[in-house]
Image (cartoon, rainbow, N blue to C red):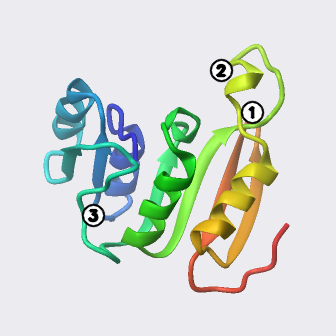
Amino acid sequence: MGTGSAIFAEAFHDAGGSVAGVDINREMIDAAKKHVPDGTFLLAPAEELPFADGSFDVTFFGVVFHEVSDYAQALHEAFRVTRHATFILEWQYKQESVGPPLEHRLKETFVKDLGLSAGYRSFTAELLGTLVLYRLGKNDLQQDH
């Protein structure tokens, strides 16, 4: 979701995955199509995904989840179209000299509670420098940490 110029979609594609993406910005869709010509990129918000239930093994928000209009709806939609897990790469909730201001960052507990409310059964968070990678598992009972 929020494919942007397709930097993450291109990496997933190059690793052998089939990719699709949505963005609310037409220029980003056009850029994504240039970088991953055989991907499917559509103009749509994360809160209204134009894909059938269970269309994807995994879904991914690449440093964009803090920008969605309705966090709960975006995660419900990701849950709907995902078979296994949703990953959210976001800024850690702490003030830093890079990235958005603290008021635009999301607390880990907030993301976890949203995920569990959307129906995900497991949650993990892995710190990656200034970023954190959240994994919301749909069908597994992986331990939280």
Left or right placement of residue 26 versus residue 142 in this view: left
Q: Quadrant of residue 53?
A: bottom left
Helix, strand or loop status at disc 3: loop
Helix, strand or loop status at disc 1: loop
Residue type at mark 1: give it: Thr
Checking the image for residue 18, the label placed there is 3
Query: In front: 4, or 45?
Result: 45
Residue 101 position within the rendered picture, expressed as x and y whole percent measured from the top left: 71, 18
Question: Image point 52% across, 32% down: which residue?
Answer: 67
- Asked whether the beta carbons under mark 3 and mark 2 sit within 8 Å of each other, the answer is no
- Disc nearest the viewer among 2 and 1: 2
Question: Image point 25% across, 64% down: which residue?
Answer: 51
- Mark 3 or 2, nearer chain start: 3
Residue 100 lies, with reference to residue 20, above or below; the image says: above
- Mark 3 or 1, nearer chain start: 3
Residue 72 lies, with reference to residue 63, above or below; the image says: below
Residue 89 position within the rendered picture, expressed as x and y whole percent measured from the top left: 60, 46
Residue 95 position within the rendered picture, expressed as x and y whole percent measured from the top left: 82, 21
What residue sits right under mark 2 in the picture?
Answer: 100
CA gap between label 3 and label 1 equals 28 Å
Checking the image for residue 130, the label placed there is 1
Question: Image point 68% across, 69% down: which residue?
Answer: 116
CA gap between label 2 and label 1 equals 11 Å
The residue carrying pointer 1 sits among few (fewer than 14), some (14 to 19) or many (20 or more) residues within 10 Å by Cα, namely: some
